Amino acid sequence: NNLAWLIAPGVPLFETLIGLALIAGALTRFAAFGGVIFMILFWIGNAGFGHGVVNSDLMGLLLFMTVIVLAAGRYYGLDALIEDTAFVKQHPKLRYLLG
């Protein structure tokens, strides 16, 4: 109840930013990690589990994990272009945030 001022505008804003990043293929792993955090919170928040633990929130969580593991943005999207920049080549650890 104390965080309502943050949750009410924050959830739609971050859902939109995560979606736009995934559509554009920019910072794919970082956006998918944000999606994982959201899906964990939604899955636990909807913890009625009257029909079992497997629900749409868990499926979304698995989908975001798949995007992280397979590095989807590395092949198609803006991540492939961003990785070719001199800045990323000088800082190779940034590739972990990208696709």
Image (cartoon, rainbow, N blue to C red):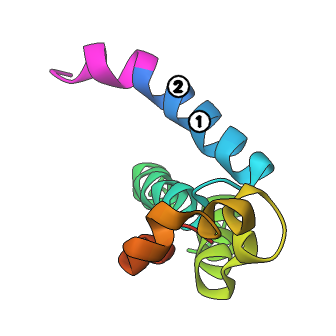
Which amino acid does the dot numbered 2 rest on? Leu
Relative image position of residue 75 (x, y in whole percent): 80, 76
- Magenta part of the chain: 1-9
For disc 1, the marked residue is 17
- Answer whether labels 2 and 1 touch (C-beta < 8 Å): yes
Residue situated in front as seen by the camera: 28 or 5: 28
Q: Secondary structure at mark 1?
A: helix
The answer to which of 46 and 76 lies nearer the viewer is 76
- Dot 2 corresponds to which residue? 13
Residue closest to the eye, 94 or 24: 94
Q: Is residue 68 left or right of residue 92?
A: right
* Residue at x-position 56% and y-position 26%: 12
Q: Which quadrant does the N terminus fall into?
A: top left
Residue 49 part of the magenta segment: no
Give how far across and how far down residue 57 sits, in percent.
61, 59
Q: Position of residue 40 (x, y in %)?
A: 44, 61
User: 59 or 10: nearer the eye?
Assistant: 10
**Can you see residue 97?**
no
Q: How many marks?
A: 2
Q: Secondary structure at mark 2?
A: helix
Residue 62 as seen in the image, left or right of residue 10: right
Residue at 67 percent of width and 63 percent of height: 79
Q: Residue at coordinates 74% horizontally, 56% vertically from top-left?
A: 78
- Direction bottom: furthest residue: 70
Q: Is residue 62 above or below residue 20?
A: below
Residue at the far front in the pictured view: 86
